[in-house]
Image (cartoon, helix red, strand yellow):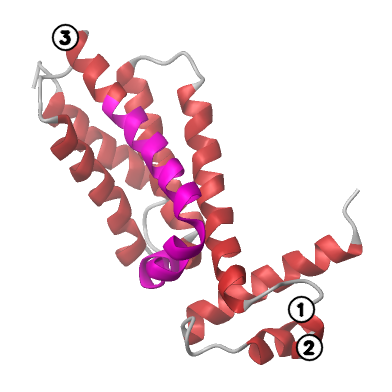
């Protein structure tokens, strides 16, 4: 059962995410966050330890969600082709569903890295290994051409990351449709039959 304190923390995290995104992390104050949730700044410290750690918690929560989705892909018996489709889908989904946290990660990466470098690195290294293994297995099975795996991985991740910059919730394509188009583009480029 969720406690009142846990519900209040979620409310604070949600408000902080919105306020940091609107005012920027440096332009927002703890007073702004307190006002948004009906608490005095001093009362916020009952729920959070610092503005920096609040930022890190917001971003890590989003990254952990992406990591969980990718772990499900990794632990499912999929062909390399289907695994690549799902990796791209999870990454695009992350950029759309956690748009604010993703933007905060980009703009405040130095703060996040200074407080949570080990966990952030572990999440990205696990993602990178999964993508590299998928491309390598695809080539070994004769499904994909042999390529520079690091360069192709960076191209795939760069395309997925770009969604953060241009996607709008009111846009004409859902994240699934965007992911499918990205997958089709990369799959055709990698395929030995193209």
- Residue on which the image places disc 3: 142
- Residue on which the image places disc 1: 45
Q: Earlier in the sequence, mark 1 or mark 3?
A: 1
Looking at the figure, which quarter contains the C terminus?
top left
> How many neighbours does mark 3 have within 10 angstroms: few (below 14), some (14-19), or many (20 or more)?
few
Which SS type dominates the magenta stretch?
A: helix
User: How many numbered marks appear?
Assistant: 3
User: Magenta segment, which residues?
Assistant: 103-132
For marks 3 and 2, give the CA distance. 62 Å
Q: Quadrant of residue 127?
A: top left
Which secondary structure lies at badge 1? loop
Is 8 above or below relative to 137?
below
Task: Give left or right: position of 31 versus 60.
Answer: right
Which secondary structure lies at badge 2? helix
Is 87 above or below relative to 77?
below
What residue do we see at 39% from left, 44% from top? 124
For marks 1 and 3, give the CA distance. 57 Å
- Residue on which the image places disc 2: 42
């Amino acid at each position: 059962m969720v406690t009142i304190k846990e519900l209040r923390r979620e409310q604070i995290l949600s408000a902080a995410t919105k306020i940091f995104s609107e005012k920027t992390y440096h332009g927002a104050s703890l007073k702004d966050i307190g006002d948004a949730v009906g608490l005095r700044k001093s009362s916020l410290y009952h729920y959070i330890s610092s503005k920096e750690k609040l930022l890190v918690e917001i971003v890590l929560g989003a990254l952990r969600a992406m990591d969980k989705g990718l772990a499900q892909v990794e632990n499912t018996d999929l062909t390399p082709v289907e695994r690549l489709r799902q990796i791209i889908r999870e990454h695009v989904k992350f950029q759309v569903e956690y748009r604010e946290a993703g933007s905060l990660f980009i703009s405040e990466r130095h703060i996040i890295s200074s407080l949570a470098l080990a966990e952030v690195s572990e999440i990205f290294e696990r993602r990178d290994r999964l993508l590299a293994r998928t491309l390598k297995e695809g080539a070994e099975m004769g499904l994909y051409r042999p390529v520079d795996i690091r360069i192709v991985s960076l191209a795939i991740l760069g395309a997925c990351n770009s969604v953060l910059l241009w996607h709008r919730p009111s846009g004409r394509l859902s994240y699934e449709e965007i992911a499918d188009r990205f997958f089709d583009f990369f799959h055709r480029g990698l395929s030995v039959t193209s």
